[in-house]
Image (spheres, coloured by chain):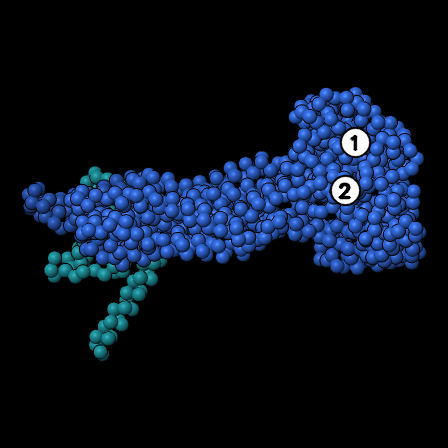
Amino acid sequence: MSGHIDLPQGTLDLLILRSLQLGALHGWAISQRIQQVSSDVLQVPQGSLYPALHRLERKGWIKSSWGVSDNNRRARYYELTKTGTRQLVVEADNWQRLIAAVAQVLENG
Amino acid sequence: MIISDLRIRMRALLQRRQVEVDLNDELQFHFQNQVDEFVKQGLSKAEAEHQARQRFGSFDQAKEQCRDERGILLIDELLRDIRFAFRSLLKTPVFLLIAIGTIALGIGVNAAMLSVVKRVVLHPLAIPEADRVVAVTTRSERNIERSPHTSASQFLAWRDGASSFELLAAVTAMRAQIAGPEGAQELHGLRITEPFSSLAGIPCLDGRLFSSADFEAGAPDVVVASERLIREHFQSGNRAIGQLLRIDGKAYQIVGVAGRVAPFPTDGIDFWIPLRFSPAQLTVRSRRDLEVFGRLRPQHTPAQAEAELNGITKQLEVDYPEWLKGRTVQATPVAAALLEEYRDTLIVLSGLALLTLFTCCANVANLLMARGMRRSHEIAVRASLGASRWRLARQLLTESCCLAFVGGILGIAVAWCLLRLADHALADSPFRSLMEPLDWSTGVSVALFSLALSIAIPLLVGIALALETLRSSSAISLRHGPSANPSGHASNSLSGVLIGMELAVSVVLIAGAALLIQSYFKLLHVDRGYAAENILSARIPTPNPRPSLEGRKAFFQDLEQRLGAIPGVTNVGLVTGLPLGGLTASVSLPASADEPVDPGNLRWATVNAVNVDYLRAMGLRLVAERWFEDEDTGSAAKVAVVNETMAREFWPGKDPIGMEIQPGVRIIGIVGDVRQEALHAEQGPAFYALYHQRETLAAAPQFVVLRTSVDPHSLIGSLRRTVSALDRSQPIADIRTMEQVLIRSVAQLRILSALVIGIAAVATVLAMAGVYGTLSYLVGSKVRDIAIRLCLGARARDVLASIAAGLMIPAAGGVLAGMFLSSAASTALSSWLYAVQPGDFTSTLAAAVLASLAAVLGGSIPAIRSLRVDPATTLRSD
């Protein structure tokens, strides 16, 4: 998996929330979405994705329900809750401020 | 957030299987999609699966991580620990049974005793607002009058004038005859003023309690009866309300039935009658026969009430100085007084409870330590397989806690049984009111406290063991094999200390038991002054309405004759106050027969109206001159016989024979003192007079005493029949042999002795078991060492000595410590001891010897086992 960057945990949460902003997705779709939109740079290992999804569900930011997928299999779909939507804004905001700060430090040292 | 959090956690706990299925499905779905993706990219199915599997990583690891995220990790592990703990405990069933049994015993005894103590301390008297209730008494400075009671006029003045009281009530105690289905019965009752029902919190089971109308002059005579009275006098099925009860010959209508009442002011009250004041009672000079009780208003202190009541009395005094002068009024809180009475008992009970708990915990600690050390090999193996030290330690802790919890629950069951048992056994004894029903809250709080204690001790031991585990080196344990004890030196010395302390406790308890047993026997064999074998006694109270003096005398003469005719009866005695019978009559006598009666200088003596045969019936000792003879009954000259104390105190240095007690009453002889009030109390001045010569019924004989040539029990029926044949309305009560009377009088001491002996036995057996277990373990763990040393030529005896030495020193120390402690501890028993001091050396020494014997006995089996070690087989088999 060289060439791909490992994701820190907090960031993964942010990405999951963003992926779900446009509608409910199952776990596979979320990982595909993140991979595609980041042009294959970000690949989420399954060992991190599902624990993260369960953690977010426990926090109440997303909720899950069982349904049938496109290929007629039983799948678990996740969608944002109201709290999750609010949290997404907060997390995104924090992220922007973080990278701005890091960039500043790198530039001016 | 919190709701969803909880929901998910609950679901993870309760629907475990479904959650696992969901997890599996979810991950499988992802995997299948990954495979499909690879297939789309052109790989073969097999190749796609292979790649996907590589990509995916370990299923199980993914699952584990998801499980960790469920938030029930801790609970999950805890449940697993508990399951494992039970499995490993069940592998050693003997240890399990002994450990749980010991904990249950310790907790049970402790909880039972502390429940009683706590309830008595918090609610010594079960009446409403007991802490605000006081008893109002009057003391006279000039005359140490026996009666602290109040006159009606004084009571009414207080009632109308005092503002410190919410309620103020007066009562008169009555012993009255109730005509029952089997002849007359004498029962205790109270005449009460109106507020008393509320004051004493009398519960009404049927009908009603008294209302104001019942207390008005001319109102019909009504009575509230106790449940017991109704049960014994009326057939079930008939409603008692409205029926008539004949009390002292007068008819009262039953208006209410009372339920279980607190023993206030005394125990055994069976009926209540309204107290109405007659005009004669309202004069100031009337008799003082009222007991007064009051409930203070909130925020008012007894001292304030006293000041107020004294003020009112002083105002009365102004008008009637010669009768009321010098009286002081006191208000004493009743609950506090009762508590004071129980104080010594409570201290002893608490001490016994804690000592039992301590011994049981020490034993359990020893058991746990021995077991922990035995498992060091198993733990080492598990540690080497990857279990974290912390996890192992937690497991040991969980085991201790499970043990403690189960033991604790059992202990509460034991406590409940013990309390039921005690309630039943003490139903008839002076300790009865200690066993008043326990309410829920006391029981629950004591149970929780005991449970916490029961968990705390094994927890501490578990922590010690866990620390030991964390510290110990796995490698060494593995090398030494399953039976070795590589790092247990600290635990061994701790074991020794615990055994020492247990033995100390044993010594203290055995010494206490010895002191009580000695007191008991010394009391029973004290020089009583009268016989006790083959004597039957019964109480024959003067009936109400009172017969005439002549009539009563004729009755007694008839009775003497008829009772004497019963086969098996050798002597018939009549007396006012039976020794230990609970009743005495006293009379005040002038200091000297020649001087006029001076109220300030009176002396009191007990008076007994007797018949001629009483001396022989009771076995009294004649000291000087003579007793009464038949001639004295008919003659006009009044005679009396005094006891030694009266002779000594009233006529010091002189011979009382021929002197006069009262004008016209001449002393004809002296008899020995008897133990009248109690076996440990020496008698005060007393004298005997013939009932034939008495001029009032005041101190008429109340008891009949039969000396028999056969077993006294066999004559009970004849006695009863003879009395009722003579007079059907004569009540007869308390038919007992003199031996029974003696034993009843020491009931408290007997019960306490039994309790202390029981606890001492338990503690000693536990200490013995502790010695057995510890020494057994020591020998077992050192069996290789013993074998080697025997091979090298050591004598079996020396080997044993070196092993046992580690245990003998703390044991001996414990016994010595126990000897020192017991003299201090036994002071708690001083109110029950008779003729023996708390630090009595013989008892202490006997206790030390017994405890040491127990220890040696406990250690003997492992010791013998160690001597039998066969070096060849032992070394070969390791």
Residue at 91%, 33% (x, y): give it: B635
Q: Is residue B564 above or below residue B270?
A: above
Depth order, front residue of B594/B159:
B594
User: Do the CB atoms of the residues marked 1 and 2 lie less than 8 Å apart?
Assistant: no
Coordinates of residue B23 in the picture (x, y in percent): 25, 44
Residue B283, percent from left and from top: 92, 47
Q: Secondary structure at mark 1?
A: loop
Instruction: Give the residue pinned by disc 1.
Output: B613
Q: Amino acid at mark 2?
A: Val
Q: Which residue is mark 2?
A: B623
Q: Subunit of mark 1?
A: B
**Could you give the CA–CA distance between mark 1 and mark 2, rounded to whole angstroms?**
17 Å
Q: Nearer the viewer, residue B11 or B267?
A: B267
Looking at the rendered structure, the secondary structure element under dot 2 is strand
Colour of chain B as rendered: blue
Crowd band around label 1 with a 10 angstrom C-alpha radius: few (<14), some (14–19), many (20+): many
Question: How many numbered tags mark residues here?
Answer: 2
Q: Is residue B724 visible?
A: no
Of circles 1 and 2, the one toward us is: 2
Disc 1 marks a residue whose amino acid type is Asp
Image point (41%, 45%), residue name: B854
- Of residue B795 and residue B338, the one placed in the foreground of this image is B795
Q: Which chain is cyan?
A: A
Nearer the observer, B432 or B292 = B432
Residue B136 in view, yes or no: yes
